[in-house]
Amino acid sequence: MKKCLALILALAMLCTMGLACAVAEGERITGTGVGQGIDGDVVVEVEADASTIYAVNVVEQNETPGIGSVAAEQLPGAIVEANSIAVDGIAGATVTSNAIKDAIRQALTGAGIDPAPFEVAPEAAETAEKTAETLDCDVVIVGAGGAGLTAAVRATQEGAKVLVLEKMSMVGGNSLKASGGMNCAGTKFQAAAGITDSGVQEFIEDTMNGGHQLNDLALVTTMAENSAEAVEWLESIGAPLPKVAATGGTTHKYLHSPEDGSPVGAYLVAKLSEEAEKQGIEIMLNTKATEILMDGGAAVGVKAEDAAHDYTINAKSVILATGGFGSNFELMCSFNPSLANAVTTNHPGATGDGILMAEAVGAATVDMDQIQLHPTVYQATSMLVSEKMRSLGAILVNQEGKRFCNDLATRDAVSAAELEQTGGYAYIIFDQNLVDNNKSAKEYIEKGMAVTGETYEALAEAMGVDKDAFVETMNTWNAAVAAGEDKEFGRNNGMDADLSTAPFYAIQIAPGIHHTMGGVKIDPDTHVISTDGAVIPGLFAAGEVTGGVHGGNRIGGNAVCDFVVFGRIAGANAAEYAAAEVIAPAA
Ligand code: ADP
């Protein structure tokens, strides 16, 4: 690849000097270019002449499955169709999109074709007339993240004809980014691991305490009581979560994750998508719902649009599964202006559409000002460093090389403690043993997020912190793990392994916007509740679009439990409502 790059660069220089740009109109040339993706080189082959791009093929890439890989699949076709590099990148996959575009520019230049004519943006699609189209189904589901996919599979199992709308060019939403696991209580996996002290009642108490008792107890109870069944249902569709660990903010072991330790979100989104495909569920990508259709006070469908159509989608029931609003700074700042300059871990589609659409038909909202900061976000790329790292033994130290809090307290408490440290940041420290047991840790290192050292002193030097203080911190921590007691800060979980296996690693992190706990008000049957306290017939909601489950602070692992439990309930109830509606007119 190096030789190829040198050749490309030489040709590019010649071209700039006007010596090699001799490609005539109609003379088709194939060139290769390289762009820098999120996980290394993205290599692209381009067939073009001076005025037309005929083909673009991504021949090598190692981008994130379901995110960057979507750009690699979709962007080349869009560029060929528009005959322009100046098309919109794939939202949520900006780095990969730019890598593909850079690679095309390089390929063209290297082949002696001036890329400038292809930098002109294609005519705006809005100028074209959209076609009006009407579609019919039993249940229309808005959003194909964890909640929407779960609801779609469940409703289809109940016999409903389901249509799923997803405004992005990929499924998964924020759920795809969930890196930890799914909290569940009273499961067979806990029993198999000999965990007997982490049942439904403890789960309810930990969730209520973690949420500062602001949570809706009925919703929390429903979530906890249905969690074991939910994890078994996941197993029934080929998505077992057999590994059990502790999570931040709890004293118990509820966090269920895949056998191979891979991040839970990408795993579940892939499995749910496979099951949806098996069931023949139609998922309309790049299709945004804009309005809930009402008739006589009941939801009877949605209006939606894509680049070429205005859809009227008639349905017997509607499920909102549009996620939260952690990427809508205007909306977040209307509740908490101090968030204006914070980074967000949220995908760009988390703009609160479902909440706004529901409010427009009279829905009530709860806890909209409760916006969670996650304490371990790598600021340069807004990438979340999973809480599971601390569950597996990692600790936090400040710029003085010292621990400063119970590293596994609730997210709001750890974030607040971090903001009080020098510079408002900290380092997460881990060792090779943890890396060997956690896929995500390997990924962080591969992405260049960590500094490393063969000794504590070397790591301290790489971090730029005081060596003596850091060595003392590490020795004190390892002794605390050996004794099973953290006298300094009272941490009482994630202490199964010390941090003594070289090499050692540190990632600089700070708080970032992570989860919007508030949203549409629902009852335990996932009915959307109106501002006057009544059920809005035909309208259901599940997942981050709803409020009340997490109160003032969400516990790690509860977002996944939320979307699986309430996604299943919404799917089953919306299907049942739709079936009842079919029978109703005859009565
Ligand atoms: P949850 O965990 O509740 O499922 P996610 O963020 O994982 O939340 O998924 C929500 C999904 O809904 C995202 O994929 C997002 O792009 C999609 N979405 C949001 N607003 C709309 C909309 N107006 N129309 C269609 N899809 C939407």
Image (cartoon, helix red, strand yellow):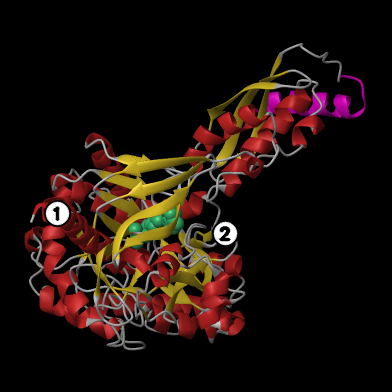
In the figure, 234 relative to 71: above or below?
below
- Residue type for callout 2: Thr
Q: Which of 190 and 372 is in front in this view?
A: 372
Q: Where is residue 253 in the image (x, y as percent from the top left)?
A: 19, 70
Quadrant assignment for the C terminus: bottom left
Q: Where is residue 577 in the image (x, y as percent from the top left)?
A: 17, 58
Q: Which of 308 and 82 is in front in this view?
A: 308
* Res 58 → quadrant: top right
Q: Residues within 10 Å of mark 2 (few under 14, many from 20)?
A: few
In the displayed structure, does residue 372 sit left or right of residue 80? left
The reply to whether the magenta stretch includes residue 11 is: yes
What residue sits right under mark 2 in the picture? 381
Give the magenta-colored segment's residue range. 1-20
Residue at the image position 50 percent from the left and 44 percent from the top:
306
Q: In the rendering, which numbered label is found on residue 31? A: none
Q: Position of residue 450 (x, y in %)?
A: 53, 59
Residue extending farthest to the top is 27
Residue at the image position 60 percent from the left and 44 percent from the top:
89
In the displayed structure, does residue 13 sit left or right of residue 76? right
The reply to whether the magenta stretch includes residue 200 is: no
What residue sits right under mark 1 in the picture? 585
